[in-house]
Image: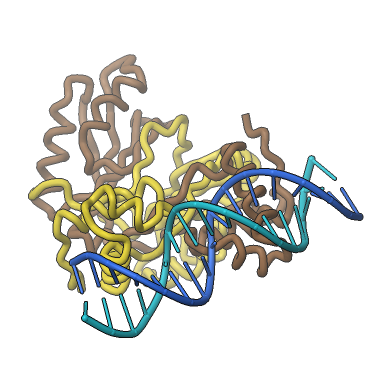
Chain colours: A yellow, B brown, C blue, D cyan
Amino acid sequence: MSGVRLDPVDENIITLLVEDARRSFADIGARVGLTASAVKRRVDRLRAGGAIAGFTVRLEPGALGWTVEGYVELYCRASTPPQAIRAAIARFPEVVDASTISGEADALLRIVAADMQHFERVLEQIGAQAFVARTKSVLVLSALLRRPVTPLHEAP
Amino acid sequence: MSGVRLDPVDENIITLLVEDARRSFADIGARVGLTASAVKRRVDRLRAGGAIAGFTVRLEPGALGWTVEGYVELYCRASTPPQAIRAAIARFPEVVDASTISGEADALLRIVAADMQHFERVLEQIGAQAFVARTKSVLVLSALLRRPVTPLHEAP
DNA sequence: TCTGAAACCGTTCCCTC
DNA sequence: GAGGGAACGGTTTCAGA
């Protein structure tokens, strides 16, 4: 699956793109010691290999009108397939992150809502799904850290 | 704080940039009915207003060698200031997301590690911090959904 | 892996609405 | 205040060596 080998130059390029994805290849090349076309070829290879999934914009939820954030643990009825969970929650744009997890709960969702009433309504609608036995939620009080995933820093 | 007003054209532009942040202004303009310079002015305004925090690359953790992911609840000793938590966990590059939360625990961390041994070692080191009373962690079994935050879809 | 040239794009300025 | 159009300089993207 992960058929990509990254050398230190690739990691430098990725780090620079994490900081600013609209940096020019010439600028990146000047920092890593390559020409623009050499950088482009490496980026193309990283995209083809799947290490780079795409380029996107970092948005400020607060500035877009999203002021309430919370996590919701989902406890599902016996033998609910993960795909059923996925299909049901994908209909809610407020769910920005969802994983099946170990432990007592079956899944953990991260929800971003415009305000508390909005959050509550989404929570009710999710709790009303047929496969949901119960939910347990916590609100985010303040964001301490929000980092993109970067290349391996050192051997574990 | 959120001194930004977004009209439907702004939301279209942001949606297109979420899909591909390296799209040219001319290409975006052709899709929203503006010229390249008009699009640039709007993007500049969105950046200045804080709605757009920057441009970045979407990476595939698995392809970069990160195979284990988990959530860690932090239970801290009485009156640990959030900034102390932040300062301590910021030293671990494996912590990609951290928030103070309501409920019994004080903070929730998301950790991305190379393998299970790596995850365990990070967990031990975080648990050994002076202000940490105990931790409770769950492993991510599979990612169901991973979405970027987008503009308001409809009125809440 | 680099060079070079052509096409393309980002950026700015001025004009119009 | 916001968009259109043109012009300049830098960038991307090929070919070819």
- Which residue is found at the position 44% from the left and 45% from the top? A71
In which quadrant of the rendered view does residue A115 lie?
Answer: top right
Residue A45 versus residue B101: which sits nearer the camera? A45
Percent x, y for residue B136? 24, 39
Residue B35 versus residue B123: which sits nearer the camera? B35
As drawn, A133 above or below A66? below
Q: Residue furthest top?
A: B79
Horizontally, residue A114 falls left or right of residue C4, namely right
Residue A149 versus residue B13: which sits nearer the camera? B13
Horizontally, residue A144 falls left or right of residue B34, namely left
As drawn, A14 above or below A139? below
Horizontally, residue B139 falls left or right of residue A119, namely left
- Which residue is found at the position 12% from the left and 36% from the top? B124
Percent x, y for residue B93? 22, 40
**Count of numbered circles on the image:** 0
As drawn, A88 above or below B38? below
Percent x, y for residue C6? 48, 77
Q: Is residue A125 visible?
A: no
- Which residue is found at the position 48% from the left and 61% from the top? B22
Horizontally, residue A68 falls left or right of residue A6, namely right
Percent x, y for residue A107? 37, 56
- Which residue is found at the position 45% from the left and 49% from the top? A110
In the rendered image, the quadrant that contains the N terminus of chain A is: bottom left
Q: Is residue A22 visible?
A: yes
